[in-house]
Image (cartoon, rainbow, N blue to C red):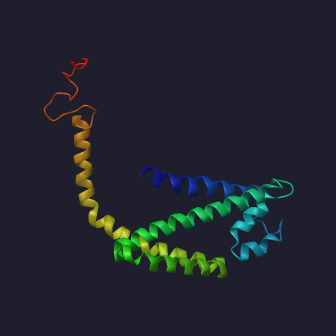
């Protein structure tokens, strides 16, 4: 759970904020100063705009667009691996393990289509699919909120009573109490 919370924080808050600051500080968003960036902004090419900002001749680092290209490739590749795994596990849960090959074929088909369709269409489609996943998750959160609340109350009660401390036993005596460090008899 902690890793699942940490990843969106690093990705969204830290990386996106740093990217936005680079674009703002270098002025790459300002089409009056940088008319060549107008085409990137109109075509929704955020990665290319970021590359232009990072490689800015006066305020950027000239070799950094190469580092950015490698980072974007690794991010995209790791995203594909994780989403394919998560999707396949969900598919197998819904339709059984025997149907995993169907999911893999669908995933490869959409991966191929993603390489030939415009970035705007891909982003719109992926946003729509993520929204589609949000609705059942929100419904599940609402339906299970009472159970989660009772489990949380039970956990905090056990925590305040010390039942989660190391060495606790229900009989009131520590499990290690009375145990002596003796050499085994021969």
Find the residue positioned furthest to the right.
57
* Direction from residue 104 to residue 62 in the image, left or right: right
- Going 63% across and 78% down the picture, which residue do you hit? 120
Instruction: Answer above or below: position of 126 versus 148.
Output: below
- Going 82% across and 53% down the picture, which residue do you hit? 59
* Direction from residue 33 to residue 43 in the image, left or right: left
Find the residue positioned furthest to the front.
186
Q: Position of residue 142 (x, y in %)?
A: 30, 66
- Going 24% across and 59% down the picture, which residue do you hit? 146
109 or 16, nearer to the observer: 109
Disc count in the image? 0
41 or 2, nearer to the observer: 2
Location of residue 52 (image quadrant): bottom right
Location of residue 64 (image quadrant): bottom right
Quadrant containing the C terminus is top left
Q: Position of residue 84 (x, y in %)?
A: 50, 69
- Going 45% across and 66% down the picture, which residue do you hit? 86
Q: Position of residue 177 (x, y in %)?
A: 20, 23
44 or 106, nearer to the observer: 106
């Amino acid at each position: 759970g902690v890793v699942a919370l940490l990843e969106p924080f690093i990705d969204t808050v830290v990386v996106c904020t740093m990217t936005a600051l680079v674009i703002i500080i270098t002025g790459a968003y300002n089409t009056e100063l940088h008319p060549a960036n107008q085409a990137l902004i109109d075509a929704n090419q955020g990665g290319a705009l970021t590359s232009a900002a990072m490689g800015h001749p006066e305020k950027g680092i000239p070799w950094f667009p190469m580092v950015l290209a490698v980072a974007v490739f690794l991010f995209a590749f790791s995203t594909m691996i994780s989403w394919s795994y998560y999707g396949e596990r969900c598919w197998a849960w819904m339709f059984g393990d025997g149907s995993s090959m169907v999911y893999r074929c669908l995933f490869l088909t959409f991966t191929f289509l993603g390489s030939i369709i415009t970035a705007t269409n891909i982003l719109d489609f992926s946003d729509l699919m993520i929204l589609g996943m949000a609705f059942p998750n929100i419904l599940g959160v609402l339906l299970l909120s009472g159970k989660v609340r009772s489990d949380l109350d039970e956990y905090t009660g056990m925590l305040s009573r010390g039942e989660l401390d190391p060495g606790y036993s229900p009989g009131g005596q520590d499990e290690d109490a009375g145990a002596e460090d003796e050499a085994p008899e021969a």
